[in-house]
Image (cartoon, helix red, strand yellow):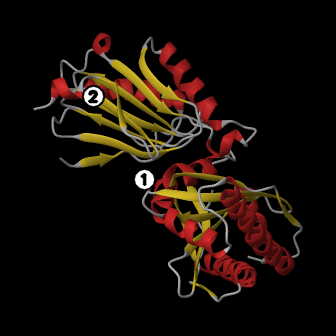
């Protein structure tokens, strides 16, 4: 099964049952996943900063305030039911032991959370903060979100990988 | 952030060459054996491409980060493959994966980073000082993206100067990244008269 990279600032929604969306090496960035399990629709945004300084721009995944509504719109456009969407987020680490005074990771997590609140979406599961980088995978067909920290095993954050195995 | 001309990129590459040459000499003195450098890469690309250009994002790497301040704001980042970091510790006679090992790598980062930025400073008349080193082991993409985003002034193009050096006769390679802030790039080019 091929993996489709969702790189920094990018955002992808899909209903292709074979598609696996992946954001590799999230540090202070957030991997924001939306999953409509019943309809086999899923999306992933690789959010890099809290607020857009001047409108949406060409990369709507870049900023939390645009990434959340844009990903939701793309999901709905593919046929997802708003009420059925499960949301997961991972990342927002304080790399280098939180040495930086501006705490991008923490502010990213807060901005995504607040934008989800405005869109009236509840967070089903999250793995944010800490000091370790993460990789996030979203399996559209199975409705599964997986997170892996550096030098650790994969952890299923949303869904059931065993039950969904084909 | 604007696009850069060929001449500007060449000039930045030359700066990196001089900086890493000086750092390479410092490392050779510290280890008592010859160290070679490769021609530095000047990466001026959209953010996602710049992160990819540094290397495979999920590979674990040990990194030493020095923030620099003064006339030039930015970050110097030393990046080692884990085995090569262990080899380097071995050459210094310290246990890798120990507190002493990490602190030795931090000190190497400090010495190399300081000689690199001092060489730059002397060449273009800037006073540059490093903050103390911070060492971490993590996914390369997480390290590089966080450094690029830390300044919270991200443009469409990321600029970084990537130099590689390796210890002769050993599997010990490290890469050396200078990530100037957006204003820092403009200042550097201004000082070079470009």
Task: Give the vertical position of B2 relative to A13 (above or below).
Answer: below
**In percent of the image, x 45 and y 26: which residue is there?**
A68
Chain where mark 1 sits: B
Q: Quadrant of the image for the C terminus of chain A?
A: top left
| Chain of the residue on which disc 2 is drawn | A
Q: Is residue A154 left or right of residue B143?
A: left
Q: Position of residue A10 (x, y in %)?
A: 42, 43
Residue A159 place in picture, x, y as percent: 27, 22
Judging by the rendered image, the residue that carries numbered circle 1 is B58
Percent position of residue B161, x then y:
62, 70
Image point (68%, 36%), residue name? A103
Give the labeled residue for mark 2.
Answer: A144
The quadrant holding residue B186 is bottom right
From the viewer's perspective, is B61 left or right of A139? right
Q: Is residue B176 visible?
A: yes
**SS under mark 2:** strand
The x, y position of residue B31, in whole percent, is 70, 81
Q: Is residue A53 in view from this perspective?
A: no
Q: Looking at the image, which residue is at 50% across and 39% down?
A: A62
The relative height of residue B79 versus residue B139 in the rendered view (above or below) is below
- Picture quadrant of residue B22: bottom right
Crowd tier of the residue under label 1, counting other residues whose Cα lies within 10 Å: few below 14, some 14–19, many 20 or above: many
Mark pair 1, 2: CA separation:
20 Å
């Amino acid at each position: 099964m091929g993996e489709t990279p969702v790189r920094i600032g990018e955002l992808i929604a899909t209903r292709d049952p074979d598609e696996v969306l992946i954001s590799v090496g999230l540090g202070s960035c957030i991997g924001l996943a939306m999953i409509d399990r019943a309809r086999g629709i899923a999306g992933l945004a690789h959010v890099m900063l809290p607020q857009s300084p001047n409108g949406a721009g060409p990369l709507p995944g870049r900023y939390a305030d645009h990434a959340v509504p844009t990903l939701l719109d793309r999901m709905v456009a593919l046929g997802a039911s708003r009420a059925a969407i499960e949301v997961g987020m991972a990342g927002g680490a304080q790399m280098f032991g939180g040495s930086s005074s501006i705490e991008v990771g923490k502010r990213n997590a807060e901005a995504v959370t607040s934008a989800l609140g405005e869109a009236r979406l509840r967070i089903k599961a999250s793995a944010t903060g800490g000091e370790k980088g993460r990789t996030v995978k979203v399996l559209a067909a199975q409705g599964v979100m997986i997170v892996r920290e550096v030098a650790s095993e994969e952890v299923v954050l949303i869904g059931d990988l065993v039950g969904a195995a084909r | 952030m604007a696009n850069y001309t060929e001449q500007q990129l060449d000039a930045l590459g030359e700066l990196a060459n001089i900086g890493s040459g000086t750092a390479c000499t410092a490392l050779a003195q510290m280890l008592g054996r010859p160290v070679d450098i490769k021609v530095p890469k000047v990466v001026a690309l959209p953010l996602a491409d710049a992160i990819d250009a540094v290397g495979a994002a999920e590979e674990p790497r040990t990194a030493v980060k020095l923030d620099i301040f003064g006339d030039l704001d930015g970050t110097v980042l030393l990046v080692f493959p884990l085995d090569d970091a262990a080899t380097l510790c071995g050459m210094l006679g310290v246990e890798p994966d120990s507190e002493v090992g990490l602190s030795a790598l931090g000190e190497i980062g400090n010495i190399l980073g300081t000689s690199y930025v001092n060489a730059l400073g002397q060449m273009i008349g800037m006073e540059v000082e490093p903050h103390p080193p911070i060492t971490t082991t993590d996914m390369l993409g997480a390290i590089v993206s966080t450094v690029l985003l830390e300044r919270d002034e991200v443009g469409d193009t990321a600029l970084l100067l990537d130099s590689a050096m390796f210890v002769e006769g050993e599997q010990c390679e490290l890469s050396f990244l200078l990530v100037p802030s957006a204003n820092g790039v403009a200042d550097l080019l201004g000082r070079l008269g470009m």
